[in-house]
Structure formats: C-alpha cells, structure tokens
Amino acid sequence: MAYKTIETRARIGFIIPSSNRMVEPQAARYMPEGVQPHFTRIGMTNRHKAPLEKLLPRILDAAELLGDSKCNVTVLQCTGTSMSGGVDMEAHVIREIERVTGKPALSAASSLTAAFRTLNARKLVFISENKQPDHDKKKDFVVEAGYEIVADKAVGLSGTDEYCIMPPELWYDTAISLRDESADAYFISCANIRSIDAIEALEKELGKPVVTSNQAAFWCSLRMAGIKDQVPGLGRLMQYDLPKAAVAAE
C-alpha cells in the first residue's frame, strides 16, 4: 500500500525566555494551518538576566538545537533581551543565529522594526509593561533605530506573574489614554502579555495600525518563510508582505 505523506508548509522555531507563558499559546492560536511552531526555552530574564553578548552562547546553542527540527526561520522572541544591546548588537545576534542554523533568523526587535518600516510608521506611541528604567532602555533602542516617540507610558507591572494575568483591556485603555493624532502607529511591547487580543479593537477606535511584539514576530516569521496567509485577529499588519529581498525561499 502506498501512503500519502504528511507535509508541513513551514516550521518556525522560537527561542523564548524560561519565564514566558504567552508565546506558545498565542502561536498555537494564530499560526495558519500547516505551519508548525517549535519552541526552546532558555534563561534570559529575571534571575538569568545578563548582557546580550553574554547570553549569545546560550542563544546559539538553542538555535542550533531548533535547527535539528528543520525550522525555516528562527526567532529570538524576547523584546527586552533583543533590544538590550542596541541596534548593532541585535543585528550581530541575528547574523550569528543564521550562521549556526543556515536559515533566516529574526528577533522580537527586528520584527518590530520591520513592521514599522512596512507600515511607514515613523512616529510612534510606545507602551511597555516595564517599570521606568527598563521602559527607557527599550525606548532608547527604538529611537536609535530611527523612530520618534510622540507619547509613551511605562505601565510598571511588578514582573512575569503580573504580566501574564493582566487582561487585554489594560492595554486597550492605556493606548486610548495616550491617543495622539500625530502618531503613525501604536506599539505595545512585550512577548509575555495579552495585548495581541486588543489589536483589532484598538485599530478600529484609533484609526491607526497597532503593533505588538508577538503579532510582529508571527507576521515577520511567516512572511520570511514564504507564508502569505491573512491571519484573522492580527490587524492591519497582516495585509502586508516583506520586501522580496527579506523573504526566504520556500
């Protein structure tokens, strides 16, 4: 008897912090049919927090192991970590992941800046889950990358446990309170929160694109893997492709 083989359209590998509880369920919910997410956890936040260059060997070990699963794209999915060393260091980390996997790579930071470029969003309202010092570090990265922050707020949550339990309404209400007609887009940072569920309601109310860390990573990784599906619930960003030069061959 001849059997029909079961094929996947793409495999996306995510390197996430050991403390993260949101990327896996959100990827399971939003990845299109036939696209398989794979995950590796490493210590990079809380008690494991360290300069990005010191985390790099750990990141590369994780990327190499994900490579055994034949992932089309590998994603370092932690906003604060990927932004922590500045623009040049973040680009170096991506190149190193690509070196060990032989496949395209991205980070939370690079997927966000790709989203801003694609949306032609130069002026941003910026919201983070952090207390002010870590909020300011992310803000510094965004400004270094060439974007203007027209309004911002550090929500000041206490840590991982609180990040995960706060409802989408918190992010909706915070964005609405910062409404600024000069903004091109609204950016809600963090891969470990429920902001993804507020995107469409916010876009309807604000009339502007809304970009979140996990939404941007899902969009960018899918497009890099050659998947052009329109995923319901992820807002205006999903209408767009990456520039052809940035898209990996299937």
Image: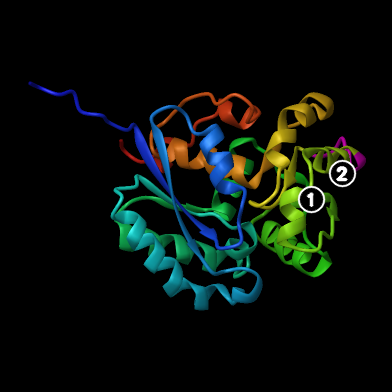
Residue carrying label 1: 127
Residue 181 counted in the magenta span: yes
Amino acid at circle 1? Ile
Q: Which mark is residue 174?
A: 2
Give the spatial CA distance, label 1 vs label 2: 8 Å
- Image quarter of the N terminus: top left
Are the residues at dot 1 and dot 2 in contact (C-beta closer than 8 Å)? yes
Q: Main secondary structure of the magenta part?
A: loop
Q: Nearer the viewer, residue 160 or 145?
A: 160
Q: Amino acid at mark 2?
A: Thr
Residue 7 versus residue 66 in the image, above or below: above
Considering the image in quadrants, where does the C terminus appear? top left
**What residue appears at the point 14 percent right and 24 percent down from the top-left corner?**
3
- Residue 151 location (% of width, % of height): 86, 49
Q: Return the x and y of residue 229 as percentages of the image width and height.
A: 47, 25
Q: With 248 as the anchor, is 133 left or right in this view?
A: right
In the image, the segment drawn in magenta is 177-183
Count of labels in the image: 2
Q: Quadrant of residue 197?
A: top right
Badge 2 crowding class, 10 Å Cα cut-off, few under 14, some 14 to 19, many 20 or more, is some
* 133, above or below 32, in the image: below
Image x and y of residue 170, in percent: 84, 43
Occupied quadrant, residue 47: bottom right
Considering only order in the chain, which callout, 2 or 1, is on the residue closer to the N terminus? 1
In reply to whether residue 12 is colored magenta, the answer given is no
Residue pictured at 74% horizontal, 54% vertical: 163
Is residue 106 found left or right of 147 in the rendered image?
left
Q: Residue at x 62, y 74 (%)?
A: 49
Left or right side of 236 for 56: left
As helix, strand or loop, the secondary structure at mark 2 comes to: helix
